[in-house]
Each structure stands twice: as structure tokens, then as C-alpha cells.
Amino acid sequence: MQEKPLKTIAYIHTDFSQKFGLPRQSGLIDELTGYIEFEKGYRNPEAVRGLDGYDYIWLLWGFDVASDEEFKATVRPPRLGGNERMGVFATRSPFRPNHIGLSSVKLTGIEYTKYKGPLLRVSGIDMKDSTPIYDIKPYLSYTDSHEGAKSGFTANLKSSELRVEFPEELLNRIPKDKRSGAIAVLKGDIRPSYHNKREIEKIYGLSYAGHNIRFRVDKDRLIVIDVNDQVLAGE
């Protein structure tokens, strides 16, 4: 049987121009929002009839920045410090046979426009701007939620939070409605799990909402040192 290629039905627009800083999973940071814009062939309002009756939706999307390396049976999950291997199908690593992501996001509203059709407003995103969407399905609480389900090697992992020191002068350079999202992202410690925690002088850059947020980390303190409107160039 001939396989049919995946069709891009929409693109999601978010405040992240790069993948650095994105939450490791969807639903972790409610303040991170975006909207889904359908491609021309899928802008019929009838296609989303009844969708406003759901609080959450599933998004199937493409890792458009994932590499095309040859298939590897194991990967090094960052959450394990990058030192331990797990089977690729026991992880949510982007390095997969098919670069397909799965996210559950909150549907906060549907805006009907004249030229772009229905726009889906969502929160709790974990995708960079202009990520292709392959399909959208409603989240069904009676079957998609399994109380008491095992979580594998992630069950005993602790999420560390940093104390963010964001000078008011620098914070005010970010649009008011984006500030809580920026702080929430930084608080989650977006550095690779295998970074050298002794490198307190290392400067990191986060591209968020059209701004470059530069910061360093000293133990459990994250200190923002600059904010400008220059987009990062692979920093």
C-alpha cells in the first residue's frame, strides 16, 4: 500500500524564534501562549465546529529543526544529565525515525477572522514559532487521563527552580503581557541538564517575544544582566 505524505494543515505562532528556552513538555507554563493559523485549504469554520466545547486539544506537529541523522536505538535524555542512555521509544526526544511531536495544550479561544479563517488561541505551548501542525484532535478526559499511571524513569526526577533576579529597568523593556511568561521560563532553569554548574560567569541568551534576554546563573540564582530587541544568532 502506498504511503501518503503528511500534510501541514496549520502553523503555530509563539514567542520563541529558537528552541532554546522552550519548556521540556507542554502544559508546564500556562503563561506561554500562541495561536494556530490554518493553511488556506483548511480555513473553513465548519472544520472547527464543536471544538469550543473542549478545554484542551492534542497537537501533532513537526520537529522542523531536528537533524536527519541515521536512526539510533538509544538517546541521552537531558533530564538524566546526558550521561545515561534510554531507548528512543521510552523518551520524548526529537531525534526519532519520524520527526513528529505530540502536545496537549489548553484551548483558550477561537477567533473567527475574515481572511485567515478561525484562529485557535492556546496556552501551555512547547513549540517554537512557525512550527508546522499536522493534525488537531480534542483531549478527552475520560480516556486520555489515566490516574496512577507509571511514569518510567521520569517518576523520581526532581524539577529544580531558580530564584530569578530581574531588575525592574530590564523587565520593563519586555511587553507587559509577556513578563510573567519570561520569568516563568527562566525560573525553570532552561540550561542543558548536563551543563557545568560551576560556570557562574557563563552568559546565556534567551530569544523570547522579540527580545534577547541575557543572564547568568550562580547556584540557585538566575541574574538577568541585559535585555535588548536583537534576535539571537545561534548563541
Image: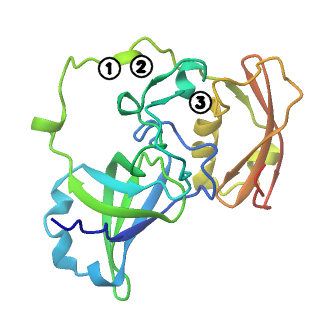
Q: How far across and how far down the image is residue 77, in percent? A: 52, 27
Looking at numbered disc 2 in the image, what kind of residue is underneath it? Answer: Thr
Report whether residue 184 is seen. Answer: yes
- Check contact, mark 1 vs mark 2: CB within 8 A: yes
Q: CA distance from mark 3 to mark 2?
A: 16 Å
Most foreground residue, 154 or 36: 154
- x and y, in percent, of residue 78 in the image: 57, 27
Looking at the image, is 230 positioned above or below residue 195?
Answer: below
C-alpha separation, residue under disc 1 versus residue under disc 2: 6 Å
- Give the residue pinned by disc 3: 188
Q: Nearer the viewer, mark 1 or mark 3?
A: 1
Residue 227 position, x and y percent, is 81, 50
Where, by quadrant of the figure, is residue 90 drawn?
top left
Numbered tag placed on residue 154 in the rendering: 2
What's under tag 3, amino acid-wise? Gly
The quarter of the displayed image where residue 121 is located: bottom left
Q: Left or right of 92: which side holds 107? A: left
Secondary structure category for the residue under label 1:
loop
Q: Earlier in the sequence, mark 3 or mark 2?
A: 2
Assign a secondary structure to mark 3. Answer: loop
- Residue 167 visible? The answer is no
- For residue 227, the mark is none
Residue located 76% across and 16% down the image = 219
**Three-letter amino acid code at disc 1?**
Ser
Residue visible at 49% across and 43% down in the picture: 95
Residue 151 is marked as 1
Question: Is the N terminus in the top left, top right, bottom left or bottom right quadrant?
Answer: bottom left
Dot 1 crowding, Cα within 10 Å, few <14, some 14–19, many 20+: few
Q: Secondary structure at mark 2?
A: helix
